[in-house]
């Protein structure tokens, strides 16, 4: 999933530094049938013994810092509908998030629906609107100050990012090393973002 691609890309150099002799072959297309490990969401694969939950989707609004005090300041979640909202394919996520915050009017002034998380983040960074982002996807941009989370509220969405182990990893030490490293990186992310 693109959510994890954004997050993983900046961390892969750390793995290569720790394990320079391990060759990685990473496919983001989802079309490769012959794999040792796959990072998937629960909508792609049914939960099963070969799946390890890496992280639940934990959603929060994010935007460029300039939108906080612009012409329509963001003082409460109800103010969000007065802004341009950026959706990722499923527009119900914003509606659910707003309802969980007690907002009665959930129809935004205007919106854009995109099917690529990278594009969604770029739109938000460029000040085009407010995105409902997964904390994993937005973490680095928040830490760099390119994005801000105007509200502390985060809500889980009924989905998650899973590690799918397709083959036995007993004969491939590199696969086991990558799996252990990935699980440690996810644990660090959860600690930084205060995710249970």
Image (cartoon, rainbow, N blue to C red):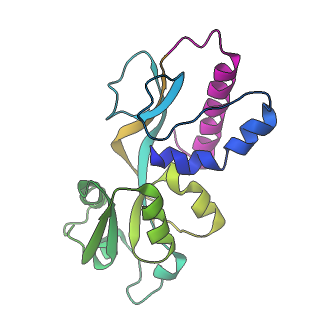
* Residue at (44% x, 70% y) in the render: 123
* Residue at (51% x, 71% y) in the render: 125
Q: Is residue 55 left or right of residue 141?
A: left
* Residue at (54% x, 21% y) in the render: 36
Looking at the rendered image, the quarter that the N terminus falls into is: top left
Q: Is residue 66 left or right of residue 173?
A: left
126, above or below 48, in the image:
below
- x, y (%) of residue 144? 65, 65
Report the magenta residues as a range: 167-196
Q: Is residue 159 left or right of residue 177?
A: left
191, above or below 178, in the image:
below
Q: Is residue 113 left or right of residue 131?
A: left
- x, y (%) of residue 186? 59, 38
Mostly what secondary structure, the magenta segment?
A: helix
The answer, for residue 168, to whether it is visible in the render is yes
How many marks can you see? Answer: 0
126, above or below 164, in the image:
below
The answer, for residue 154, to whether it is visible in the render is no
Q: Quadrant of residue 105?
A: bottom left
């Amino acid at each position: 999933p693109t959510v994890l691609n954004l997050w993983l890309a900046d961390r892969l150099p750390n793995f290569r530094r720790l394990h320079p002799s391990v060759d990685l072959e990473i496919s983001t297309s989802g079309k490769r049938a012959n794999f040792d490990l796959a990072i998937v969401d629960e909508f792609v694969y049914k939960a099963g013994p070969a799946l390890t939950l890496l992280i639940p989707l934990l959603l929060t609004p994010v935007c460029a810092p300039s939108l906080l005090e612009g012409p329509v300041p963001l003082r409460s979640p109800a103010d969000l509908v007065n802004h341009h909202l950026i959706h990722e394919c499923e527009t119900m996520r914003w509606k659910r998030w707003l309802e969980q915050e007690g907002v009665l009017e959930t129809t935004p002034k205007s919106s854009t629906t995109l099917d690529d998380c990278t594009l969604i983040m770029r739109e938000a960074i460029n000040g085009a609107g407010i995105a409902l982002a997964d904390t994993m996807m937005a973490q680095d941009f928040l830490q760099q100050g390119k994005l801000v989370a105007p509200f502390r509220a985060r809500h889980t969405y009924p989905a998650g990012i899973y590690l799918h182990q397709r083959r036995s990893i007993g004969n491939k030490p590199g696969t086991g090393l990558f799996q252990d490293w990935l699980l440690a990186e996810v644990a660090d992310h959860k600690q930084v973002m205060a995710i249970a």
